[in-house]
Image: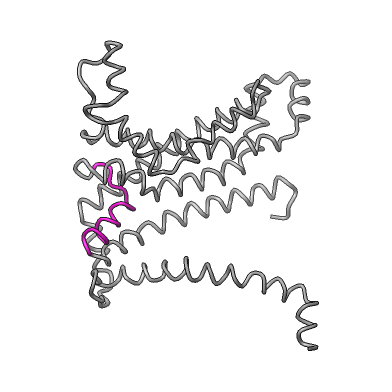
Amino acid sequence: MKLLERFQNSRNALGWAFMLPATLLLLLFLTYPLGLGTWLGFTDAKIGRDGEWIGFENFSFLVTDSVTQLALFNTLFYTFVASVLKFGLGLWLALLLNKNLPFQSFFRAVVLLPWIVPTALSAIAFWWLYDAQFSVISWALMKMGLIDEYIDFLGDPWNARISTIVANVWRGIPFVAISLLAGLQTISPSYYEASALDGATPWQQFRHVTMPLLSPIIAVVMTFSVLFTFTDFQLIYVLTRGGPLNATHLMATLAFQRAISGGALAEGAAIATLMVPFLLAAIMFSYFGLQRRAWQQGGDK
């Protein structure tokens, strides 16, 4: 009884007790699959057959594999272009929504719609918009006399890359915009009033007041945006399944194709493992952004 009373009166013990269920869930559904996937990458496992340890053979093969190299290029290109566009358009939208506009709450809610709609459903909508025969975009452009024939959005390699990036940007802008809007609302109006008294122009206020104070939020938001984009799967799989000619294969879709569709579990796991260093780099970027925020708020670090 005394031990139970001491446990109930101990704040540390209660804290660990409340953390235990979450810790077990993380170990079961995050740590274990990650460890198992990494282990499989060093074996020759296939669906229906246990693998044996083969060291770095899978990775050696993937480094020289032309499809994997193309998927890596596609992933980096897709992530970089989409992230830059989402940041630029999201920041512009956040600045616009931060102003006193009529029906402000309504517009803020509407902006979230692309983020709320399930990825598979929005991908099907874009697939219809990009259809080679029934594309509404091509039909409208032909009616305006801008093109003579329907655009093959998903049949041409570069058209497909650009089309998937547009779809990803459309889905990702709300997350960036609403997150940056929340950051903008934390900036005290007194900073803008003081800078206006000193004769600062709107551009100078944005450059010397808004951006420095918003930069920690930007670091965190863009870290998550890059993570979401780099690991994108559903949008690409529904729209193109990696085609045409592997032009839109990302590391995630290629890993799924090799492991599940092709049955080579070890090879797919190795591809997924190759994604980890990039994800760790993004997390470190977020960490240093948070450190800067602590310094701005007068923290020790």
Q: Which of 127/210 is in front?
A: 127
- Relative side of 216 to 252, left or right: right
19 lies above or below 148: below
Q: Position of residue 53 (x, y in %)?
A: 27, 77
Q: Is residue 32 magenta?
A: no
Which residue corresponds to the image point at 20% horizontal and 51% vertical from the top-left? 66
5 lies above or below 170: below
113 lies above or below 46: above
Q: Which of 152/273 is in front?
A: 152
Residue 263 position by quadrant: bottom left
Which residue corresponds to the image point at 69% horizontal and 49% vertical from the top-left? 295
Q: Which residues are magenta?
A: 247-263
- Quadrant of the image containing the C terminus: bottom right
Q: Position of residue 54 (x, y in %)?
A: 25, 74
Q: Is residue 24 shown to the viewer in this render?
A: yes
- Relative side of 22 to 253, left or right: right
151 lies above or below 276: above
Q: Position of residue 219 (x, y in %)?
A: 56, 44
- Relative side of 10 to 122, left or right: right
Q: Is residue 207 shown to the viewer in this render?
A: no
**Number of numbered markers:** 0
- Quadrant of the image containing the N terminus: bottom right
Q: Which of 198/196 is in front?
A: 196
Q: Is residue 248 magenta?
A: yes
Which residue corresponds to the image point at 78% horizontal and 76% vertical from the top-left? 10
**Residue with the most extreme top position:** 145
Which residue corresponds to the image point at 67% horizontal and 74% vertical from the top-left? 17
Residue 140 position by quadrant: top left
The coloring applied to the image is one colour
